[in-house]
Image (cartoon, grey):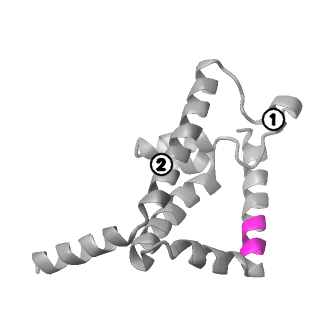
Amino acid sequence: MIRAWSTRLRAAVNGVCATDVARAVLAALFVAAIIYVAHVFGFTLCPLKRLSGVPCPCCGSTRAIVALLHGDATVAFAIQPLATVVACLLVPSLLASMVLFGRCRTNAFLVSVARKRITWIVFALAILVNWAYVIHHGN
């Protein structure tokens, strides 16, 4: 049973495109480096908050993800609900789809989902509700 499971896992991992994984890792490292340098120098990356004082829908995402990585999901959700939900639901589902679909078919799956109007309506409503929450709580 263990041999069959390991064979299936190996086949699934071999089906994932190495270039897609490498690009995602490099992009994440690049963004993390920019955020770290900005944090060290006390620079606010959000142009809306810097110019108007009003937080954007994404303000607090970095703090929320850091809290989530430290295992404090309630604090992460209190800081930035949308980023927490995306990190907890979307990222694992994308990784699972990469493993299940394999061979770089994830892009085709995401494009087919993105073409549906209801996807964009739900996405826009989630951003608006999250933005109202962030402004109300003063993140």
The x and y percentages for residue 96 are 42, 71
Mark toward the start of the polypeptide (2 vs 1):
2
Q: Secondary structure at mark 2?
A: helix
Evaluate whether residue 75 shows in this view: no
- Position above or below: 128 against 102: above
The x and y percentages for residue 65 are 53, 45
The x and y percentages for residue 43 are 70, 23
Q: Residue at x 47, y 47 (%)?
A: 68
123 drawn magenta: yes
Horizontal relation, residue 89 to residue 138: left or right: left
Q: Residue at x 50, y 67 (%)?
A: 94
* Most common secondary structure along the magenta stretch: helix
| Foreground of the two, 24 or 66 | 24
* Residue farthest to the top, as pictured: 41
Look at mark 1 in the image and give the residue it sits on: 47
Q: Residue at x 56, y 46 (%)?
A: 27
Q: Hey, what amino acid is under mark 1?
A: Pro
Q: Quadrant of residue 124?
A: bottom right
Q: Secondary structure at mark 1?
A: helix
- Position above or below: 71 against 105: above
Look at mark 2 in the image and give the residue it sits on: 25
Question: What's the magenta region?
Answer: 119-124
| Foreground of the two, 83 or 96 | 96
